[in-house]
Image (cartoon, rainbow, N blue to C red):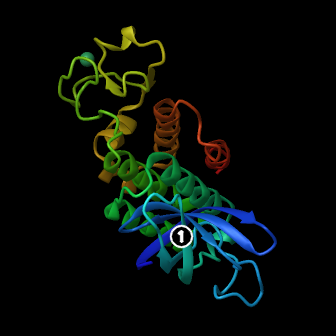
Amino acid sequence: MPLKKDKGLCIRSTDYSESSQILTFFTRDHGKIGAIAKGSRRLKSSFCSTIEICTIGDMVFSLRDREKLATLTEFNPTFLGLEIRKKLLALNCAFFAADLLNLFTKELDPHPELFDQAVFLLQNLRDNPDDKVLPFLILFEFALLSLTGSAPLCDICANCKRKFDADWKQYFFSASARGILCRDCESAFVDKKMIPFECAVCLNQPSKILSAQQQTLIKVEEILIEYITSVLERPPRTADMVLRLIKKS
Ligand SMILES: [Zn+2]
């Protein structure tokens, strides 16, 4: 059976028997794959240790056609994220990102750029204090939504398609309309919320996120989580904790 090599980020992990783990990896070149790591929970296994969520590493695995689960034969961690585990918000953002990667990607459907964005997020969760991590989480969510074809419409009114403009005076967002709404269209959508101009600008131009005020960032994150919940038709299970932590900060 040919062995494949790739870089992978562990996004789910379940113990399987006394000594093994069933893992889900988001890999750079093969997309999402499920894999069994036989003996990974043994002290003296061919893996350095139990493989934890949000660990990144160089992996070798075999995957037969039509087989659902790959067999992981080697995993050499290049990023353990131990510093992330010491910070409450960073850790919950990392779990949330892993959850989103699992929910928004399909097996064997590679998105190398999204993999790189996930690595960038984890590095920033590691390198920044908790009060500076929110912009990086938001940028990752925008990248994930756009690269998986689920981005909200924020450069035009999602209903009448008029171009986003600083002269609109009032701005609304509706998850059911899948984007920003102008004043003429908002009344047709019961779930719409009026949003501040700064917030609309960040949705329209995500590059503004890095210089936005914390209050604006919190509002943008609330909108994104509501939108993601609507796209998935259920809330990601880690979203609630992230929201609670950022509102406390
Ligand atoms: Zn409109």
Q: Which is nearer the eye, 26 or 161?
A: 26
| Residue 159 appears left or right of 176 | left
Query: Residue 187: which quarter of the image?
Result: top left
Residue found 37% across the figure and 67% down from its top: 116
Q: Is residue 50 left or right of residue 246?
A: right
Identify which amino acid the numbered label 1 is placed on. Asn
Judging depth in this view, the residue of 121 and 215 nearest the camera is 121
Above or below: residue 191 compared with residue 229: above
Look at 46% across and 67% down and name the residue there: 64
Residue at (77% x, 87% y) in the render: 43
Q: Check disc 1 and report its element: helix, strand or loop.
A: loop
Give the class, few, some or many, for how many residues have Cα within 10 Å of label 1's Cα (few <14, many ≥20): some
Q: Which residue is mark 1?
A: 128
The answer to whether residue 246 is above or below residue 176 is below
Q: Position of residue 63 (x, y in %)?
A: 47, 69
Q: Tell me the quadrant of ligand 1.
A: top left
- For the N terminus, the quadrant is bottom left
Tell me the quarter of the picture where residue 47 sits.
Answer: bottom right
Residue 172: give x, y in percent of width and height.
38, 23
In the rendering, at what x and y percent does residue 118 appear? Answer: 44, 63
